[in-house]
Image (cartoon, rainbow, N blue to C red):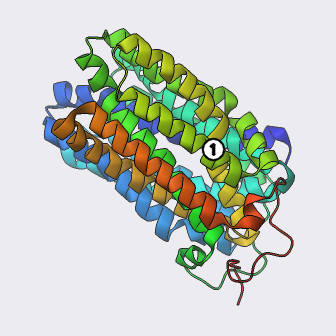
């Protein structure tokens, strides 16, 4: 697949993610302008994650049955519709409905886009998966900027309408780009049978560990820095610093994962990440946390693409959408549950307990993933599946 087309699909990924970014920055406007009670705001956010989770489990595998193009189109259209409903809504029910529809669209489109990009250019799987990750993070980070520019001048609906319009502009590309569709549809309707593959389970463990880290970081970072008497500026800079390396290093990190082997590089990065998470629990000052966070972000930028690469080499080409959907579902579930539990642990035992528990579980998942992958996958340094996979762990899409 030419680089320009990969970049186009990256743009689609960024636009899908930017709706999330906008959502988080206008929650206070929903409360102040529309009178939505604070306890409903969490439901608005959470409902989108729930619908995306369900779509990635139950709808994403449709892309493996010769419907990848259609799923991207329908996903983009549903996300656009959800954004427009949220733009028009000023009460709880329309906002909930828009968020639910948008989540379904994102959960359909993300895995289908990954399937298209991975199967179109297997030799550059790592770089392309890393680019999609970079686009995802960049889109999420751009959402607040769009809101900050448009909301004061044009009102709350403006950023939703702009992102919806840009999404529609991308649609014609989906119709003209060549896509490798499945010749023989997989016999399994859903992707749960992929869990019979040990490397696939190992990849899901890696993804869960990454979002365990992200969920803990997102839930506690600002609170901990506030408790350390850091300024709001320092807290916000820390979040930006954490995101930037993922944007600029994601593609390179994916190439590293493909060359070194994702089941080597990924667990190594997770163990390093666990060390950094533990340090957040014991560092005495905000400046120290910010310094460690900067180093942590660089290493994450170089390693977290390993998860997508690991799924890409673990699942057969005709099961990529289902596999990527399973990964997204595992990550969404892990991040959401962790964000809640991290807050509970922080309330019970402070930041040392919360970050230490996160670090210990991350190490356990990293070691488990390394062991579960098996020697054949751990020793790989290329970007394709082993030629003679272990029949006990291989899963195909055919009877």
- The answer to whether 259 appears left or right of 19 in the picture is right
Q: Position of residue 142 (x, y in %)?
A: 51, 26
Judge by depth and name the residue closer to the eye, 312 or 78: 312
Q: Position of residue 391 (x, y in %)?
A: 74, 83
Judge by depth and name the residue closer to the eye, 64 or 334: 334
Q: Is residue 126 above or below residue 33?
A: below
Q: Residues within 10 Å of mark 1 (few under 14, many from 20)?
A: some
In which image quadrant can residue 14 be found?
A: top right
Judge by depth and name the residue closer to the eye, 165 or 317: 317
Q: Position of residue 139 (x, y in %)?
A: 55, 33
Q: Residue at x 75, y 34 (%)?
A: 252
Secondary-structure class at tag 1: helix
Q: Residue at x 86, y 52 (%)?
A: 123
Q: Position of residue 38 (x, y in %)?
A: 15, 35
In which image quadrant can residue 136 be found?
A: top right
- The answer to whether 104 appears left or right of 319 in the picture is left
Q: Is residue 109 above or below residue 215?
A: below
Q: Is residue 390 above or below residue 103?
A: below
Q: Residue at x 79, y 52 (%)?
A: 177
Q: Which residue is mark 1?
A: 268
Q: Residue at x 34, y 48 (%)?
A: 338
Numbered disc total: 1
In this rendering, does residue 160 appear at all? no
- The answer to whether 78 appears left or right of 349 in the picture is right
- The answer to whether 11 appears left or right of 273 in the picture is right
């Amino acid at each position: 697949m030419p680089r320009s087309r990969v970049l186009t699909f990256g743009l689609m990924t960024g636009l899908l993610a930017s709706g999330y970014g906008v959502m988080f920055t206008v929650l206070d406007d929903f409360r102040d302008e529309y009178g939505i009670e604070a306890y409903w705001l969490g439901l608005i956010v959470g409902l989108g994650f729930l619908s995306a989770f369900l779509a990635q489990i139950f709808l994403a595998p449709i892309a493996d049955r010769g419907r990848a193009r259609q799923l991207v189109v329908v996903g983009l259209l549903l996300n656009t519709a959800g954004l427009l409903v949220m733009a028009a809504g000023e009460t709880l029910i329309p906002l909930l409905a828009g968020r639910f529809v948008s989540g379904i669209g994102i959960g359909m489109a993300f895995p289908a886009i990954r399937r298209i990009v991975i199967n179109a250019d297997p030799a550059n799987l790592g770089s392309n998966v890393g680019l999609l990750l970079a686009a995802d993070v960049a889109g999420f980070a751009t959402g607040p900027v769009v809101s900050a520019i448009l909301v004061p001048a044009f009102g709350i609906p403006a950023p939703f309408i702009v992102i919806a319009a840009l999404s529609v502009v991308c649609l014609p590309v989906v119709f003209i780009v060549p896509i490798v569709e499945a010749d023989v549809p997989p016999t399994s309707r859903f992707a749960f049978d992929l869990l019979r593959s040990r490397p696939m389970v190992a990849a899901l463990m890696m993804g869960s560990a990454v979002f365990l880290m992200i969920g803990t970081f997102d839930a506690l970072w600002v609170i901990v820095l506030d408790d350390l008497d850091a300024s709001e500026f320092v807290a916000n800079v820390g979040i930006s610093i954490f995101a930037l390396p993922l944007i600029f290093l994601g593609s390179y990190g994916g190439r590293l994962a493909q060359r070194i082997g994702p089941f080597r590089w990924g667990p190594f990065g997770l163990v390093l990440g666990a060390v950094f998470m533990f340090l957040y629990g014991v560092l005495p000052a905000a400046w120290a946390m910010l310094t460690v966070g900067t180093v942590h972000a660089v290493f994450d930028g170089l390693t977290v693409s390993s998860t997508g690469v690991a799924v890409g080499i673990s699942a057969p080409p005709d099961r990529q959408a289902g596999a990527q959907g399973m990964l997204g579902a595992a990550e969404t579930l892990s991040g959401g549950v962790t964000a809640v539990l991290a807050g509970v642990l922080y309330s019970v035992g402070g930041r040392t307990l919360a970050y230490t528990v996160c670090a210990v579980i991350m190490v356990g998942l990293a070691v488990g993933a390394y062991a579960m992958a098996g020697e054949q996958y751990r020793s790989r340094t290329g970007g394709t599946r082993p030629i003679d996979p272990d029949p006990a762990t291989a899963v195909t899409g055919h009877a």
